[in-house]
Image (cartoon, grey):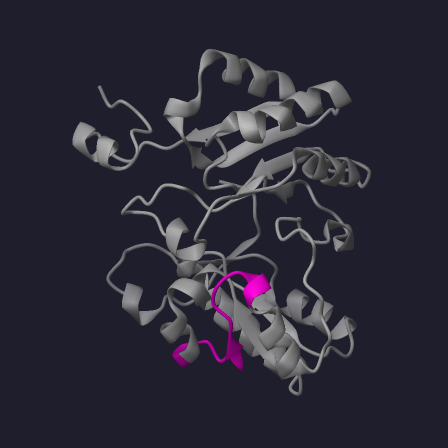
Amino acid sequence: TGKLYEEEIPKPRIFSDIRRKYHRYGLPMERLEGAMRQAGHVDAVLVTCPMTYWYRGAFEAIALAKKVWPKAPVFLGGIYATLCGEHARRFSGADEVLPGPWEQNIAQFSVKTGMDISPPADFLTSPALELYKRLEYAPIMLTRGCPFRCAYCASGRLFDKLVRREPDELIEEIARSTRIGINDFAFYDDALLYEPEKALVPLLENIIESRLKIRLHAPNGMHIAAIDKELAKLMRRAGFQTIRLGVESLSKSKHDEWGAKADPG
């Protein structure tokens, strides 16, 4: 629903029976290529694909990287590379496919490139947002992974356990982002409301005490059963503007099987 640049492109053959137009979203390819060439020499190219159905975009990015930097090895990681590793190795064009969390692949990446890279202290830190010329919002994560193992969700295959950040660390990250003009922050946690008293509640209380004038958003489906009146008030006071609630099924037995996140009755 965002106002993103888009252009109609030829529809892949597999979608030929679907009577809908096919669009590419994001920078026009010529602008992307120009920006890449301005970067000059690079030692390696890292491409990520956070959704499996975005794989065609990753393929185009890899092909363009090889055109601009033919001597630089191209690595593909992310959710698509983790869940569809064999497909990625066969069709992506990447020199190496690195499934799993990045920290598990740092040693392999260092060996293959000859680059001495030390793992960062906090793997949930947001990207280097200051490198963007203009950015309207920042992605943030308080937790990674999910304790539930719902049949419809791949989170358990991506991360074997739930890991929490210290709320003070995220507060510092948010404060740094506000200094470069970012006031909207979107949580990309899979289980933001799981045991909220251990992470989310202290974070929200800290935001309120710090008087940060920010807007918070939760585009992922949130755990309905975890929101009580007091937590809802706290979320509102801290600046929550947008929330999405997860309703997986209208079947009570399915809800009970998947963690009783909501009561369909």
Q: Quadrant of residue 61?
A: bottom right
User: Viewed as shown, does residue 55 lie left or right of 6?
Assistant: left
Foreground residue, 164 or 133?
Answer: 164
Quarter occupied by the C terminus:
top left
Is residue 251 within the magenta segment? no
Tell me the residue at 37%/33% (across/down). 246
* Position above or below: 10 against 139: below
Is residue 102 within the magenta segment? yes
Foreground residue, 238 or 59?
Answer: 238
Q: Quadrant of residue 53?
A: bottom left
Of all residues, the one furthest to the right in this rendering is 179
* Position above or below: 232 against 41: above
Where residue 141 appears, as percent x and y from the top left, is: 59, 42
* Position above or below: 260 against 12: above
Residue 241 in sight here? yes
Numbered disc total: 0
Where residue 102 appears, as percent x and y from the top left, is: 57, 63
Tell me the residue at 67%/77% (across/down). 44
Where residue 231 appears, as percent x and y from the top left, is: 51, 17
* Position above or below: 203 against 60: above
Tell me the residue at 45%/67% (across/down). 81
User: Viewed as shown, does residue 127 lie left or right of 108?
Assistant: right
Where residue 60 appears, as percent x and y from the top left, is: 52, 72
Tell me the residue at 74%/53% (across/down). 132
Foreground residue, 32 or 158?
Answer: 158
Q: Quadrant of residue 16?
A: bottom left
Of all residues, the one furthest to the bottom in this rendering is 71
**Residue span colored magenta:** 90-104
Residue 211 in sight here? no
